[in-house]
Amino acid sequence: MLCIDSLLALEPFQALPKERLQWICDRAQAYPLPKGEFLVKEGNQPKGFFILTEGRISLTRLSEGVDMPIGSSEAPAFMGEIQVLTEEPVPVSVRALSDCRLYQLSCTDFLELLHTCRIFERAIFREVQKRTRGLESFIRSREKMASLGTLSAGLAHELNNPAAAIVRALKDALPAMRKLEMMNLIYGQQLPEADYTEQWQQTREQGYDTLQGQRPDPMTLSDREDALLDWLEDFGIDDAWKLSEPLAAAGIEAKALAHLTDPWLDQPKELREMGIRWLALSFEVMEMMQSGLRGAERISELVNSMKSYSHMDAGAQQQVDIHDGLEDTLRLFAYKLKGGITVERHYARDLPQILAYGSELNQVWTNLIDNAIAAMAGQGKIILRTCRDGNYVRTEIEDTGPGIPEEIQLRIYEPFFTTKPMGEGSGLGLDVARRIVENRHQGMLSVESVPGKTCFTVCIPVSTEMRASV
């Protein structure tokens, strides 16, 4: 049986008279908890108010499928008051780190006790406030780390392709360039006239210009490649298929090759073919260089997007272009958008820049766009709109997902409230977005949702004077 001395070891109970302490002892039920056993698991309904008189327990919360430690408590301690008061599911899992002795007070008895002594009630609510803030602070940190992890994974995924293209281009280009140098030496010595040499060089330069321009449509390219393949095979080149593709990409026609090779028809086969191979290899090397350049440009673009997204070189507040933040966020989410999700933009290009906390505002776009992607499960459309709305810059992020049920629309900004499966969402994403918009920028965040259309609207004041007056 629970004794009065055990209760007096806990500060809130020291304000209760002896008869009320005895009342607790009479109603509290012994609740032994062996080492390794769970008292409650995350998502369980409240079991009552618990008093820990012996042993030590741990508190964990599921995050991305992993139980993350939040803290621990050692006797004497109490727990469960928050869930009794809110009647909400338990937000953490509680497990015994050693053999524990607990006593359980029913929800009804605890509420009766709470309302009979104002000093006791005040002490309990102070503890509720402290614990809620601690849990919220931990989960906010985890939310930021999870967002960073999501963006880092996306950035790594996006960097992988251009990095591989650069490696592949450089790996293939080195032996190709050595072979091209050798051909330049041998073939250059065999050309009969200077003007004939110039014709080959002009054809190559024209091909370079074509490669650097807009690539033709696949059907045109395929027809050109087939025509070249027929001509090359008729000319007697054994591996004609290897040459037809780079020649076609450079815009070379069969009649141009016929004109260039006419003076060499009476020469040995190897020498007769070398000019064509020299052209094809030149174009291959050019394409390798261009592939590597595109890869390097893509890497530079992604790094600049991440730098811009985080506003690494700027102070806390800076002049921000809303569109830059949206586009930086979309680039970092590109790997999630490659399936069946399309993005439609309706930007007002004459929008003024606003003085804002850039990296925090980008966290708003991250949370809203990530939620839209998750809601559509890989299939649908995201529509982005911006416009000037009086003294505000208005941004709308709309998705074609299933919508938010009307009965929970008023709760979506509540801390820890989430419709995602346990462990997949902290329930703080929209709360964080609301705080950044409303508290940090004196703006407004709202939502309209029906099946097939959910639209979040963010309004940020244009000027600091406007914010000061709100």
Image (tube, helix red, strand yellow):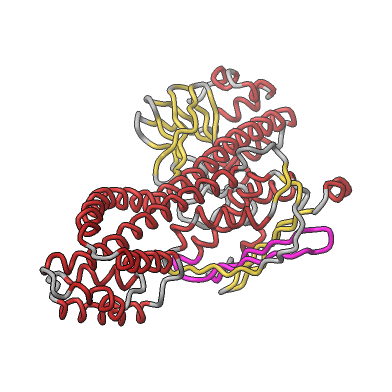
Q: What secondary structure prevails in the magenta region?
A: strand
Q: Residue at x 87, y 47 (%)?
A: 465
199 left or right of 1 in image: left
Above or below, 207 against 319 in this view is below
Q: Residue at x 28, y 65 (%)?
A: 193
Q: Percent position (x, y) of residue 316?
A: 70, 37
Q: Percent position (x, y) of residue 114?
A: 67, 35
Q: Percent position (x, y) of residue 124?
A: 66, 31
14 left or right of 203 in image: right
Q: Is residue 174 magenta?
A: no
Q: Nearer the viewer, residue 27 or 214?
A: 214
Q: Which residues are magenta?
A: 376-400
40 left or right of 312 in image: left
- Residue 44, can we see it? no
Instruction: Determine the image quadrant of residue 122.
Output: top right
Instruction: Determine the image quadrant of residue 199.
Output: bottom left
Q: Nearer the viewer, residue 94 or 313?
A: 313
Q: Is residue 390 magenta?
A: yes
Above or below, 226 against 403 in this view is below
Q: Residue at x 71, y 34 (%)?
A: 116
Instruction: Determine the image quadrant of residue 260.
Output: bottom left
Q: Residue at x 54, y 43 (%)?
A: 143
145 left or right of 109 in image: left
- Residue 368, can we see it? yes
Q: Nearer the viewer, residue 252 or 141?
A: 252
